[in-house]
Image (tube, rainbow, N blue to C red):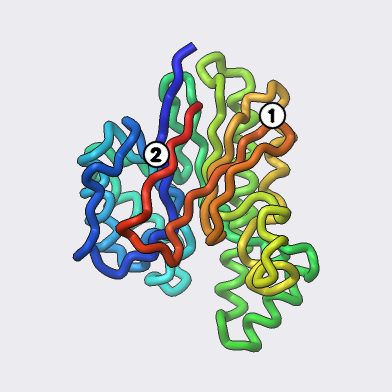
Amino acid sequence: MSVTHFDLISDLYLTTLDNFTWQYKSTSLYCIVAGNITADRTLLFEFLEILQRYYNAVFFVDGDLEHSCYEGNFAASYRNLQEGIGVLDNVLFLHENIVILNNVTLIGANGWTTFDFSNTSTVNLTIDFLTKSNMLTEEYANSIFKLAVSDQHYMYNSIETCQGMKDCKDLLLITNTVPVPDFINHNADFNGTVLGDTTGNNGITGCLSRDKNSKVKTWIFGKFPEDIDCNKDGIRYVSNPGTERDFSTYFPKRIEI
């Protein structure tokens, strides 16, 4: 059986490309970018254009950072991402776009947040705190919650569709959001805090109930600043965040499917 390798990167929080280079860093033919690269849309397209030179294909999933410049107009933001990425030769935007590559099926979504991820609060209490603290408006929070639920349904339906497709043998799930609360609750900054409640989507792993034929092998994610690589219930969960890292010492994580 053939093996496919991917380089994984995410959460670079770039504000400039002045010191950016990917020379001698690529280790695979393909790269997965799991979001939160930059809030500057022009910079994002420039970053992806540079990255594509080192790979046969780059697969991109957006994080919340990518949308911060659109002030809640998510429809326009997604439209601009699709248009800007669409002109790049070797970059594929995984938003509502399933890709089959060497019997590996890539299913990606931002995932957003349900505002109750650390399991110590409710959606309404977290949103109420954020709005009263002037961190976001109630309208903005409700839009994010709707996107989170929409991404849940997309993952559910996509996995269910793949069950009967012979070409879909190994499913590789990619989200920016963290899928499992246990991955963050050891960290005091995230356990039982608003930060923790907004780091993941509390319903997105429900999509695994649709995986009747156990095709999901790996789940890649971002957002949380710690490196995660573990197995849970037969699925490998992997992240490789560049948060607060010296970029000169940050390298992709090579994964095998």
Where is residue 22? Give x, y as percent.
25, 48
Q: Are marks 1 and 2 in contact (CB under 8 Å)?
A: no
- The reply, left or right, for residue 71 in relation to residue 194 is left
Query: Which quadrant would residue 28 be assigned to in this image?
Result: top left
Q: Seen from this angle, which residue lies furthest top?
A: 1
Q: Seen from this angle, which residue lies furthest front?
A: 249
Who is closer to the viewer here, 86 or 218? 218
Who is closer to the viewer here, 2 or 133? 2
Seen in the picture, residue 222 relative to 2 is either above or below; the reply is below
- Badge 1 marks a residue whose secondary structure is loop
Rendered image: mark on residue 7: 2
The residue at 70%/81% (across/down) is: 128
- Badge 2 marks a residue whose secondary structure is strand
Q: Nearer the viewer, mark 1 or mark 2?
A: 2
Say whether disc 1 or disc 2 marks the residue closer to the N-terminus: 2
Who is closer to the viewer here, 159 or 143? 159
Residue under circle 1? Answer: 211
The residue at 54%/43% (across/down) is: 220
Mark 1 is surrounded, within 10 Å at the Cα level, by few (under 14), some (14 to 19) or many (20 or more) other residues, namely some
Query: Which quadrant would residue 67 be assigned to in this image?
Result: bottom left
Where is residue 83? Give x, y as percent.
29, 51
Q: Amino acid at mark 1?
A: Asp
Q: CA distance from mark 1 to mark 2?
A: 25 Å
Who is closer to the viewer here, 138 or 135? 135
Rendered image: mark on residue 230: none
The residue at 69%/82% (across/down) is: 129
Figure label count: 2
